[in-house]
Image (cartoon, coloured by chain):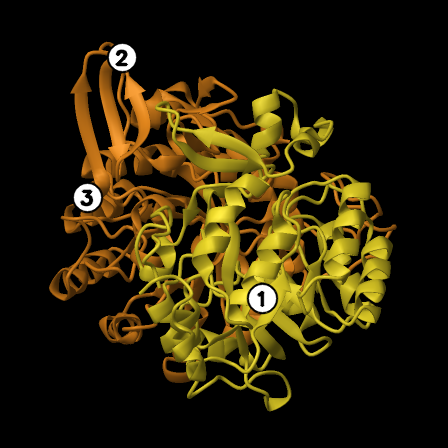
Amino acid sequence: MPSAVLQTGPLALGDAPGDGAAGATPAVPLPAMTLPLPERRRRPHLVCPAGSLRALTVAVEAGADAVYLGLKDATNARNFAGLNFDEAQIREGIAFAHARGVQVLMALNTFADARRPGPWFAAADRAAELGADALIVADTAVFAHCRDHLPQLRLHLSVQASATSHAAIEFYRQRYGVQRAVLPRVVAVEQIARIIAGTQVEIEVFGFGSLCVMVEGRCALSSYATGSSPNNAGVCSPASAVRWQEGPDGVSARLNGVLIDRYAPDEPRGYPTLCKGRFEVDGRRSHVLEEPTSLNTMALLPQLIAMGVRAFKIEGRQRSAAYVGDVTRAWRAAIDAAALAVEQGRAFEARPQWEQTLARHAEGAQTTLGAFERPWR
Amino acid sequence: MTPGSDEDAAPHGPAGWGLTVGPVLYFWPRDRLLAFYADIADSPADCVVLGEVVCARRRELRLEDWLALGRELTQAGKQVVLATQALVETEADLRLIERLGEQGCAAVEAGDASALALLQGRVPLVLGPHINVYSRQALQAHADLGVLRWVPAVELPLDAVACINPPSARVAGHLGHAIETEAWAFGRLPLSFSARCFTARQQGVPKDQCGYPCLDDPDGRLVSSSEGEGFLVLNGTQTQSAGVQCLLSHRSALAAAGATRLRLSPQSSGFLQVLQDFDAVFNGSAEAGPALRRWPSLGVPQPLVAGYAHGAAGMVALQETDA
């Protein structure tokens, strides 16, 4: 697929302005960034989560351009009980989606276990045989297998590959032929523009869903507490390690024995994801790493579309079909409206009902722009 | 098996274990850094990794300073490796990597794929612990970049490390030489990175005008559960374990896994003694137990943990019987 971005190669790096000139803003003028011309700009894809066949059909009917799914094992980063697809279900899901012009992407985005790597390579082979439109990959072992054995299979760089610069993304394109990259949720808007200008690879960003405050693919917090992490098992703060305890001061949530949070009797309770717990620093208790909120970049849609972002991903394969349907419908409408607004040079405003829908499905009923905007700087 | 009692297993191990001083992960003032490396010059370490890998805003030493320090340590007989940042975000971050490629360094430790992209074929590379190599096929996929050495991700158990680069069948890297395995043998574990600075967040100041509160935390800032149990440590944009991983009593297990080199990550107190104790246990005939019992009085952060080595939770405490 041709890129909507006119730039055809990596940007040359400017002259160094002096040592350690790192900072939020580039200190020297960079080569002019080329935004895509309107006629080359395409309406970006809406990529929606499917943790089940039911969620897949709901997403397709609600207007997704693509759905993503994974197998029922540790080869994908939502390896939760009762979730994901067996082979027959993938076949059925692909038939359903393709009949309606919707793509099916398969997430193979954990790291092959050195002691038993076979299932990861076999899963890539199956994805190709079943007719998946692309494989979402994080592990160079899997990339190398696909490059060497499945040259027809389109490859997307998973957010779990932690590529945060155009140089990193180009590395995966040049070595493995990656055609799209999903950016980590820590990348700020001005960096997204730099990345798009510096690579031929299509860029996908997160639109809505749980917020990883840490760079994806480089977080071992969960395995430090439980032994299992997104990289090594496709899980974070796994339910099997969670214990809820009623006590006189409320309800305690523990992860493999470590107190992650304690809720007063009248306080709403969240799932004890490690980075969203309340801990103490210098005797003061707070959400030290992150509050339980969700990422929502809807307000930035026109800006991101004008930059040439090619796809927006909705997080949440572990969420209900109702979530998938509501969030997909809201984002479908928002992307269409924003793309039209950009084309016609008009202002875009997210409709209150879209935002209300998203707020209803957000963690702690709150949303944030995360690293996309200033508050983290 | 009691700690240090496994020297009979030495035939598995290398003739001499390499001891690498990892990059200082905390923000230490310039004088403290220079004094630290002056001590390292006289220590049993044979390799030193230099550079700021956590936060681009930390500039007590600039690239020229690191390079000058590297020349001094080279003269003192140390192998010197320059490290790149783990989280690369800006064009300035990329330019800094470019400059490392132009310096004719003996070796560069890559912190992410940006460094692999910009430095491949230009300088011998060490794959740092944040390059995700979880299988032999992944190490092979990196081999043609000119890889000297590999530091496994901290969460990889030793039996997985053994499958990836075993003593009997090492992956060939730079100039066809066998890739060395360097295991994280001492120090608080770098567990995650963020665009957010957690130290600044604690301080209630914005990241780009932080005033460097991390200068006050020479071993990071402790995060405890609400029951007072030390759990994590904030180090700017990096989150570490509160527990200090220690594999002093794991010599035969490390040798069986193919490690020939140990990474000791600097902590602010007792580190020179830690280095000497690792040298005495791995390259001499000392026992681990007495050293481990001595460390708390030297200010070496506690507790010591070793769970990851065994495929357990990383926070699982080091047992006297561990190996």
Return the x and y of residue B199 as percentages of the image width and height. 59, 30
If the image is split into quadrants, where does the C terminus of chain A sit? top right
Left or right: residue B11 versus residue A82 is: right
What is the secondary structure assignment of the residue under circle 1? Answer: helix
Which residue was labeled with disc 1?
Answer: B279
Q: Colour of chain B?
A: yellow
Count of numbered circles in the view? 3
Q: Which amino acid does label 3 sit on?
A: Ser
Which residue was labeled with disc 3?
Answer: A240
Q: What mark, if any, has residue A264 been given in the picture?
A: 2
Return the x and y of residue B263 as percentages of the image width and height. 56, 62
Return the x and y of residue A217 as percentages of the image width and height. 45, 53
Left or right: residue B97 versus residue B257 is: right
Q: How far apart are marks 1 and 3 (CA)?
A: 41 Å
Q: Is residue A142 visible?
A: no
Tell me whether the residue at label 1 lies in contact with that at label 3, contact meaning CB atoms closer than 8 angstroms: no
Tell me whether the residue at label 1 lies in contact with that at label 2, contact meaning CB atoms closer than 8 angstroms: no
Q: In which quarter of the image is residue A75?
A: bottom left
Q: Which of A325 and A365 is in front in this view?
A: A365
Which dot, 1 or 2, sits closer to the camera?
Answer: 1
Q: What mark, if any, has residue B98 been given in the picture?
A: none
Judging from the image, mark 2 belongs to the subunit labelled: A
Q: What residue type is labelled 2?
A: Ala
Judging from the image, mark 3 belongs to the subunit labelled: A
Which dot, 1 or 3, sits closer to the camera?
Answer: 1
Q: Quadrant of residue A249?
A: top left
Report the residue at 36% width, 36% height from top: A274
Tell me whether the residue at label 2 lies in contact with that at label 3, contact meaning CB atoms closer than 8 angstroms: no
Q: Chain A is drawn in which colour?
A: orange
What is the secondary structure assignment of the residue under circle 2? Answer: loop
